[in-house]
Structure formats: C-alpha cells, structure tokens
Amino acid sequence: MGRWEPDAAGRLREAAMALYAERGFDGTTVADIADAAGVTARTFFRHFADKREVLFAGSEQLEQHMVLALAEAPTEATPMEAVAAAVLASAEFFDGMRRDYSRRRAAVITATPELRERELIKMATLTSSLTKGLLDRGVAPDVAALAAETGVAVFRVAFERWLVEPDSVLIADVIRSTLKTLSGLTA
Amino acid sequence: MGRWEPDAAGRLREAAMALYAERGFDGTTVADIADAAGVTARTFFRHFADKREVLFAGSEQLEQHMVLALAEAPTEATPMEAVAAAVLASAEFFDGMRRDYSRRRAAVITATPELRERELIKMATLTSSLTKGLLDRGVAPDVAALAAETGVAVFRVAFERWLVEPDSVLIADVIRSTLKTLSGLTA
DNA sequence: CGAGTGATGTCATTGACTGACATCACGATG
DNA sequence: CATCGTGATGTCAGTCAATGACATCACTCG
C-alpha cells in the first residue's frame, strides 16, 4: 500500500454525491466531503475546480466520445444523421452506470440552482463542440449550429425520459424513440 | 434630500458595470462596487442576491413583458407566431437603451464563465416561462417546448447580431430578419 | 545510497455571503 | 407638537469557498 489510499478523486466524488443527496448541496461543506474521503479540503480543490465540478467529472470524456462518433459518421450522412450518431454514442456511457446513481445525481442537480447553472454550461459546451465537429465535416454554419442545438435537445429529453423509465429500458432505445418523435414534429 | 441618496440599486448597477468592464469581474470586489456607489457591501447584498445578479437586474421585467405579449397574441395565431410576437416585444426593452451599454455588458459576460452560467439559466427560465404561456394557450406540450426553445434561440441570435450591427439598426428589424432566416431553414 | 518527483498536508489569507442588532430620517397618528 | 412605527442603511461578527506558499515523505530511478 502506498503512502495514501489510491483514487482520492473517486472517493471525493462518491462522498460528495452521498452528502449532497443526504444533506443537500448547501448543507454540505467541502471540509465535510474531504473528511468523508479521508483527505483535506485543500486536496479537494486539487482534484476539482470548485464545489460544483465534483458532480460533473467525466463530462469531458462524454463530450469527446460524442465528438468522435460524430467525426466517424459516414461521409454521406446528413448533418442530422451524424448528430444522431453522436447522441446515440452517449448511450455507452450510461449503460454500464447504475441508474440509481444517475437518478440521485439528477435529483440533486434539479434541487440546486448553482448546479443547474453548471449543467447548462456543460450542455452549451457540448453544443458548441458538436457544432465545431459539423463545421469540420463541411456543414454550413447555420445548419451546423441548428443541428447541434437540436441534437443536444434530444439528448436532454431522452436522458430525462430514461431516468423515469423502468430499469430494464436501455438508454439507446429511448434516444432512438426521441429521435423518431423529433422527425415526427418536423414532418 | 433624504437621509440617503436615492436609487442605491441603480448606483450599484452602474458602478458594477463600470468596474467589471474596467478591471474584469474577478478583479472587482463587492466592496469596490459598494464604495463606488457610496454604500456598504452589506447593502449590496440587500439589493442583489449575489455578485453576478447585479448584471441581470431587469431580466424579470423583460420576461414578464414577453410572456404578456405571448398571452395577448390573437387566438388564431399559430404557436410559432405567438412566440414570434413575444420575441418581437422584447425590442421595446432595448430600443431605449444605449447600445453601448449592451455591448459592454455582453463583453463582460462573454469574458466571465460565472456570468455566462447565469445568463444561461436566465435563458432557461425564459424558455420555461414561454413554454408555460403556450400551454395556457392550449398548445400541446411537445410543440410548446419546441416552439419556446426555438423562440429563445431566435432571441439570442438576433440580440447578438444586433450588437454587431451599426447603431442605426433597430433590434426589431434584426429579429424579423432572424425569424425569416429560421423559416428558410425549416422550409 | 541520494536526488528528484508527485500527491498530500499545513498555514495564512482573501473575499463572498449571512444573521443579529443598532441607527435614524421621515411620515403618520393622536 | 410629541411620539411612534417603518424602512433603508450601517456595524459587527462569523462561516465557508477558494487560492498561494511552503513543508513532508513514500516511492522511483540512476
């Protein structure tokens, strides 16, 4: 065993989720989280930029994954098809994850304005990354922005729906269904 | 003259804008703003919930105004027409305002992640208010959400374009032009 | 063995934000 | 005219998020 327990960041993430769910975001201090994880508050800030970011670790990987899927979509795919592929690729991130965790996380975020702000900016960042990915595919700026925006909207709606569905439902199926609803709207 | 200079909130708003523009958001303390406005920091927090909110005063009125315009749209208007009326109504809020102020404010917000977060949540609130307004008109939930989202997107795009246009251009014209672009996209 | 490294702890400090309480012009009321 | 709220502000003390500077020490590599 090393000088310290391994995976301090992971312990901090779990401690934060547990405490936010139990006492609420405002009722939890960074010192509380650090104590529960067996480190000091200073170490918390070495792993996460601020008290909110601890709930959003992994969002960069999700984004990278989606952007990669977008880039790998066949050249002949329409912009919206490519975006759909990117959104579908996100499923791989959640299938392995316990639904329970996602639900508690969503509940905490919904209940805390500060966390909703952070989530919104993550979505905005995702949107602009997808837009850029489309531009790289030669899509016109207006179309790219609109397609990306629409794709992220589908992602959001599908994710919310998935959280409510029974546990057996796969998120990929919910995404496909949401995409179908979208095409019905514009038809 | 009363015991205190009148309109402390207004003085705080102006002082905040000036200092944020001059030294940046992070380089400005609440005490700085309060000093410049001739009050104490404690008074700042009696007028604004936090350091970011001082740049968003008036957003509730804008929202109310738009929701009202939505409600007053003719019964026979389509959802998107009603939303367009709401977005157009926002013009009355900016025509009187010095463009210069809006530009400096936008520059500060763009440069500061914390402020961009706040702006995003204001837009999200606006979206959900417009959605609710559409539901009150009997619009189906899916359509209402989509129309509101689209309307806010138009508002955002038009506002940004307006800031770049020469000073003589009216925001209402930019909004109308943006709405036209939108209908071109979906056609 | 000794130098270097990386993750952590310790300490001090700034600044956002809050609660409790005091102050005091002004307007109403008797 | 005296007094009695009332509302906007000041004062003070305190909590907690966040950051910089410096110390520590197991581990690794030469």
Image (cartoon, coloured by chain):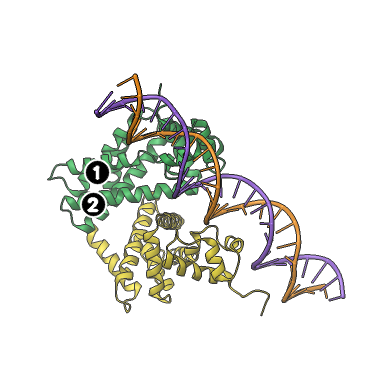
Chain colours: A yellow, B green, C purple, D orange
Q: Is D18 on the left-hand or right-hand side of B48?
A: right
Q: Residue furthest left?
A: B76
Q: Point out residue B48 in the picture as x, y percentages from the top left corner.
A: 42, 41
Is residue A28 visible in the rendered structure shown here? yes
- Find the distance from the CA under tag 2 to the CA under tag 1: 9 Å
Residue A147: which quarter of the image? bottom left
Is residue C24 depicted above or below B68 in this figure? above
Q: Label 2 belongs to which residue?
A: B132
Q: Point out residue B176 in the picture as x, y percentages from the top left corner.
A: 28, 38
Q: Pointer 1 indicates a residue of which chain?
A: B
Q: Point out residue A76 in the picture as x, y percentages from the top left corner.
A: 38, 64
Question: Do the dots labelled 2 and 1 sit on one chain?
Answer: yes
Is residue B170 depicted above or below B141 in this figure? above
Is residue D11 depicted above or below A93 in this figure? above
Specify the amino acid type for callout 1: Val
Q: Label 1 belongs to which residue?
A: B67
Q: Quadrant of the N terminus of chain B?
A: top left
Residue A111: which quarter of the image? bottom left
Residue at screen point 48% across, 59% down: A52
